[in-house]
Image (cartoon, rainbow, N blue to C red):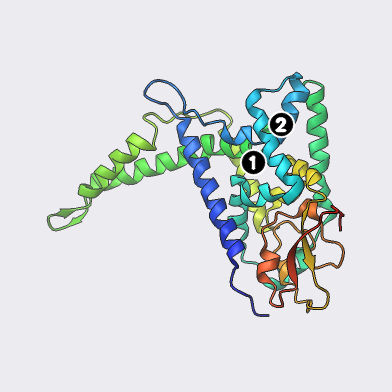
Amino acid sequence: MTRRKASWLVWLRRFTQAAFVLLFIAVFLQAQYQPVNQTGRHVKLFFLLDPFVLISSWLASHTVASGLLFSLLPLGFTFIFGRWFCGWVCPFGSLHNLLSSWSGQTTKVKIATGGYSRWQKTKYYLLLVLLVSSLFGLNLAGWFDPFSVLYRSTATVLYPAVNDGLKSLFGWIYQADPGLGPLKVTSVSEPVYEFLRRTVLPAAQPYFYGTALVAVFFFAVILLNFYRARFWCRYICPLGALLGIAGKNPLIQIERSSELCNQCGLCVANCQGAADPHVPGSWKPAECFYCWNCHSECPKRAVSIGLHLTRGAK
């Protein structure tokens, strides 16, 4: 089976994912200590775009912070474009996407395991449990909200590890003072380290209780991508479940031509959401991330994108 080169839609999606990951990093760095003892103004950006946070907060407190109303915008677009937010915006989803692409599984294995599984309903049950608990005043959304998980893991595990690693590296360079004749590495490394200290690294690295527990949870979720592509997004994510419900019958849908299809299986092998694009009449919009891999990979161009004004589910 000959794979086609990625289409411009796939490259646009990758560019968008990379942009939002960089935006998340920039927003995260604004939360560190500022000279006037204030955090950056945009540190809550991703949470304000999260309709799961909006609904769980409203159920728990019966009030809504005005900023959370911005989350109605991506929710509204979900009725049109389906779970595009999971495939194009969510930085945690982009991380899972990247790691899943490194799984090393053969195409044959991906075809065998890439179809829809009834265990994907688990995220909907988890969403129900979390919303009911919020209704009774126990707001557990922060334990499973993807932005909370990513931010907490970055703040308590990844950022301290990067900081300690860079300090050790530049400290070793300074002590060893390697070079070639009069040319010393420290003439470059010291200005770079000073720049990082002023812009990225904290003056004093804080450490947190519970870091080990956060690290175990985070790396367990990460490693599951090597078992199933985007495991968190398929089986656990409550935000994805909420968007899946909202995008169950989107206006933009995937169409498959049975006349052109040669049953090669490349569409399901590269489907991030296990949405069954290869099964006639059984494509599942609620599970589709609109990554367009099925459209890009199909050697016969049997998969296309269509507008369905009747909003009929397939």
Question: In the visual, does 178 lie left or right of 72?
Answer: left
- Residue at image location 67% in from the left, 29% down from the top: 69
**Residue 101 shows in this picture:** yes
Question: In the visual, does 167 lie left or right of 308?
Answer: left
**Rendered image quadrant of residue 201:** top left
Residue nearer the viewer, 140 or 221: 140
Are the residues tagged 2 and 1 within 8 Å (C-beta)? no
Q: Which residue is mark 2?
A: 141
Tell me: residue 66, above or below residue 18. above
**Residue 140 shows in this picture:** no
Image quadrant in which the N terminus is located: bottom right
- Residue at image location 77% in from the left, 43% down from the top: 241
Question: In the visual, does 71 lie left or right of 123?
Answer: left
Residue 178: give x, y in percent of width and height. Answer: 22, 53
- Residue at image location 46% in from the left, 32% down from the top: 30
Image quadrant in which the C terminus is located: bottom right
Residue 92: give x, y in percent of width and height. Answer: 61, 45
- Identify residue type, mark 1: Phe
Mark 1, secondary structure of its residue: helix
- Identify residue type, mark 2: Ala
Tell me: residue 302, above or below residue 286. below
Residue nearer the viewer, 15 or 79: 79
Mark 2, secondary structure of its residue: helix
Q: Residues within 10 Å of mark 2 (few under 14, many from 20)?
A: many
| Disc nearest the viewer among 2 and 1 | 2
Residue 217 circle label? 1
Q: CA distance from mark 2 to mark 1?
A: 16 Å
